[in-house]
Amino acid sequence: MKQVKLLQSKILSFSELKAQTEKWRNGHETIVFTNGCFDLLHLGHIDYLAKARDLGNRLVIGLNTDRSVQNLKGSSRPVKDELSRAHILAAMGFVDAVVLFNEQTPIDLISLVNPDILVKGGDYAIEAIVGHELVQKNGGKVCTIPFVEGYSSTRLIDKINQG
């Protein structure tokens, strides 16, 4: 598959992300960070990510690799491979960077980005969000965004499996 330059320019390694976030920070831009599997993208994801981006100037997404999704969700997941998921996220105009991470949690990535705002879905308590202490210690904010009722990847997969 030929890489599209705009999409590829948003899918970054850890070192590329570090350099990019430094540029944004030097430009006094507010960096928002979130993470997830984003396996089967649906309205709930779009709403969540758009609202996350509205909290700042730049949205960075930590994307679980295929291996880490399997560890979190089981051997039948992800439905879509990490390259596909990364490109779909990068295609969104309100997403500024996507970086794959293989660890069980994104704490190393959060440390690298040092976001101004850390965001997760409304099913998380602030105290349960990985990296909340680090972000708050560095003067950042931690927020949750409510889900759009009736939308989830698991629900979508169940519906597909039911035929």
Image: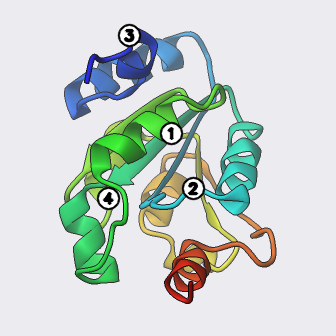
Q: Which residue is mark 2?
A: 41
Asked if 54 appears above or below 74 in the picture, the reply is: above
Q: Nearer the viewer, mark 3 or mark 4?
A: 3
* CB atoms of marks 2 and 1 within 8 Å: yes
* CB atoms of marks 4 and 1 within 8 Å: no
Residue 36 locus on image (x, y percent): 45, 60
Q: Residues within 10 Å of mark 3 (few under 14, many from 20)?
A: few
Q: Is tag 2's residue or tag 3's residue first in the polypeptide sequence?
A: 3
Q: Which residue is mark 4?
A: 107
Q: Amino acid at mark 2?
A: Leu
How far apart marks 2 and 1 lie (CA) works out to: 9 Å
What residue lies at 23% left-to-right and 30% top-to-bottom? 13
Q: Is tag 2's residue or tag 1's residue first in the polypeptide sequence?
A: 2
- SS state under label 2: loop
Q: Which residue is mark 3?
A: 5
Q: Residues within 10 Å of mark 4 (few under 14, many from 20)?
A: some
Q: Which residue is mark 1?
A: 89
Asked if 17 appears above or below 64 in the picture, the reply is: above
Q: Residues within 10 Å of mark 2 (few under 14, many from 20)?
A: some
State whether residue 130 appears in this view: yes
Residue 51 locus on image (x, y percent): 76, 47
